[in-house]
Amino acid sequence: MSGEWLSLSDVADILGVHPGTVRNWSNQGLLPVHRTQGGHRRYRRSEIELWVQSRQAERPVDARLVVQNALRNTRFRVSEGRLENEHWYGKLDDEARKQYRRSGRSMLQGLINYLNARDAHAVSEARGLGFEYAARGWRCGLNSAEATRAFLFFRNVLIESMLNVYEAAAVQSPYAWSDMFRRMNIFTDQILIVLLETYDAYQRSES
């Protein structure tokens, strides 16, 4: 089966196990499975591939599979209601609000690039995002604490999205989870550091 959706027997062939084993793993919640309206089991190819990767604890999960799942399965959306509860959001005009709502997608794309490369260019992209957050917050009249809260809001949405990817793929390897969190922290920490450094530079230039 060449499409994205696989049958139980397709998954059994891929994993090299008996179809009954796939059925049992699915029933126990050990394998990511979806149900059709008729009650038939269907499996998403990208989730099965990520699940297989995560079972190989000595190897990091292939970032491309994480990316594939994130883009296909994760709805990286921020409801207006959640934003309205943020004090800093109330200080923004309509254009600034649009830019901030796009920030989550920009951070996700930057993280994707970092997971795929993890070289000097990828780190510089994180630093570029930090400057972007700082410059936007400064233009909108946010102080450093408010700009930091804005960044943390979208970073937390990003974390939720990546958790959804791993949960959907039933990733159980402790190494896979810790590796994902470690790399995500390295990337987002760079953004936050540059945001604060840039605000400090802005404030010094005004004094």
Image: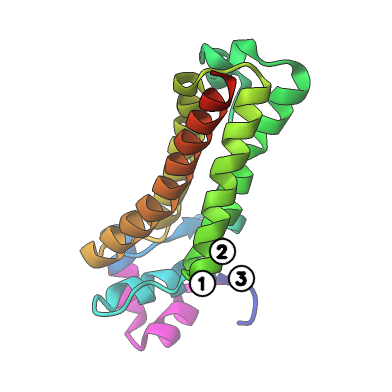
Q: Nearer the viewer, residue 138 or 5?
A: 138
Q: Position of residue 88 (x, y in %)?
A: 55, 15
Residue 41 colored magenta?
Answer: no
Q: Amino acid under label 1? A: Ala
Q: Position of residue 28 (x, y in %)?
A: 26, 59
C-beta proximity under 8 Å, tags 1 and 2: yes
User: Which numbered marker is on residue 117?
Assistant: 1
Q: Residue at x 46, y 69 (%)?
A: 118
| Residue 131 vertical placement versus 111 (above, below) | above
Which residue corresponds to mark 3?
A: 4
Residue 103 in sight here: yes
Mark 1, residues whose alpha carbon is within 10 Å: few (<14), some, or many (≥20)?
A: few
Looking at the magenta stretch, what is its main secondary structure?
Answer: helix
Toward the right, the furthest residue is 95
Which residue corresponds to mark 2?
A: 113
Query: The magenta stretch spans which residues?
Result: 6-24
Label 1 element class: helix
Label 2 element class: helix
Q: Nearer the viewer, residue 33 or 164?
A: 164
| Residue 94 vertical placement versus 52 (above, below) | above
Q: Amino acid under label 3? A: Glu
